């Protein structure tokens, strides 16, 4: 039940026909885990907290540095040297005390991923490396959890939703992350954020879109990004959508899967 204070706080949601009281109640009852409290995770956490998601978890073992503040808006100058999950907890609590925040100050790995995912309804991956993205996507499939994953480049970004453990309206399995990206690029082929740079406002833009997609998935309105990769080019301010389908040869949910646990990940 929403309290009178919450009814006023979420009034602009509740008057939306697509959300309303029932949709806001779904947000209140939802538990969402965010991988990374950095460039993408920061706006995701803030907008989901503002939206009234009942329980928000964040996985990050890093501390706040000065170079983070150009884009990681959940942290501030006084937070330099603090654990990111602690800084994020303070900001979420200040923004919306009705939200329970759970910080996980650890590095995600094959040994803890499934236990972490099991405690949440939805996972959002804002990590900055391919090893973690494949670990998260494989883990969500094995844990049977929906996943929203985003990627950020210097002037480009993308968002998609993965429900590879479920079937579409035609009874076919949905595509996995490995159907979209069968193999990670060779080490060093893609420059890091530190090497290539990143436009700060673009991180906010992609993270906000990931939060919006999470709200749509929780409430249940609009056309999901399952099987669609939304791509943004910030130089040209161009949006494109690539459709992708399940590859029957993919090793995760293909016809002859070879990935049955996370032992292939470190």
Image (cartoon, rainbow, N blue to C red):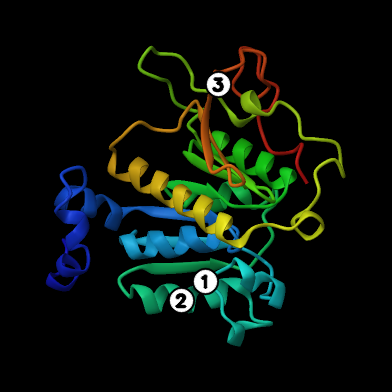
Q: Secondary structure at mark 2?
A: helix
Q: Is residue 230 above or below residue 110?
A: above
What residue does disc 3 label?
Answer: 244
The N terminus lies in quadrant: bottom left
* 162 sits to left or right of 186: left
Q: How far is mark 1 from mark 2, CA to CA?
A: 6 Å
Q: Are marks 2 and 3 in contact (CB under 8 Å)?
A: no
Q: Position of residue 219 (x, y in %)?
A: 28, 44
- For the point 57% across and 35% down, the residue is 142
Q: Is residue 229 visible?
A: no
Q: Is residue 245 above or below residue 239?
A: above
Callout 2 crowding tier (Cα within 10 Å): few <14, some 14–19, many ≥20: many
- For the point 16% across and 55% down, the residue is 14
Q: Secondary structure at mark 3?
A: loop
Q: Are marks 1 and 2 in contact (CB under 8 Å)?
A: yes
Q: How far is mark 2 from mark 3, CA to CA?
A: 37 Å
Q: How far is mark 3 from mark 1, CA to CA?
A: 33 Å
Earlier residue among tags 1 and 2: 1
What residue does disc 2 label?
Answer: 91
What residue does disc 1 label?
Answer: 74
Nearest the camera: 257 or 127? Answer: 127
Check the image and name the residue furthest to the bottom: 78
Q: Position of residue 208 (x, y in %)?
A: 46, 54
Callout 1 crowding tier (Cα within 10 Å): few <14, some 14–19, many ≥20: many
């Amino acid at each position: 039940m929403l309290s009178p204070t919450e009814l006023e706080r979420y009034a602009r949601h509740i008057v939306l026909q697509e959300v309303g009281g029932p949709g806001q109640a779904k947000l209140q009852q939802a538990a969402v885990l965010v991988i990374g409290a950095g460039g993408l995770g920061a706006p995701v956490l803030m907008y989901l907290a503002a939206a009234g998601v009942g329980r928000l978890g964040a996985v990050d073992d890093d501390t706040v540095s000065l170079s983070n503040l150009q884009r990681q808006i959940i942290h501030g100058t006084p937070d330099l040297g603090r654990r990111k999950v602690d800084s994020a907890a303070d900001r979420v609590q200040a923004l919306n005390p009705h939200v329970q925040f759970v910080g996980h100050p650890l590095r995600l790995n094959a040994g803890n991923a499934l236990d972490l995912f099991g405690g949440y309804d939805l996972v959002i991956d804002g990590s900055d490396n391919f090893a973690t993205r494949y670990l998260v996507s494989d883990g969500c499939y094995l844990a049977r959890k929906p996943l929203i994953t985003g990627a950020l480049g210097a002037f480009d970004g993308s968002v998609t939703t993965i429900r590879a453990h479920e079937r579409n309206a035609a009874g076919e399995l949905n595509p996995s992350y490995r159907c979209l990206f069968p193999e990670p690029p060779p080490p060093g082929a893609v420059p890091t954020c530190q090497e290539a740079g990143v436009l700060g406002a673009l991180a906010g833009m992609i993270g906000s879109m990931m939060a919006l997609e999470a709200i749509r998935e929780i409430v249940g309105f609009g056309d999901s990004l399952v099987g669609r990769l939304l791509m943004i080019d910030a130089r040209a301010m161009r949006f494109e959508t690539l459709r992708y389908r399940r590859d029957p040869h993919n090793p995760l949910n293909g016809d002859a899967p070879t990935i049955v646990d996370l032992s292939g990940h470190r």
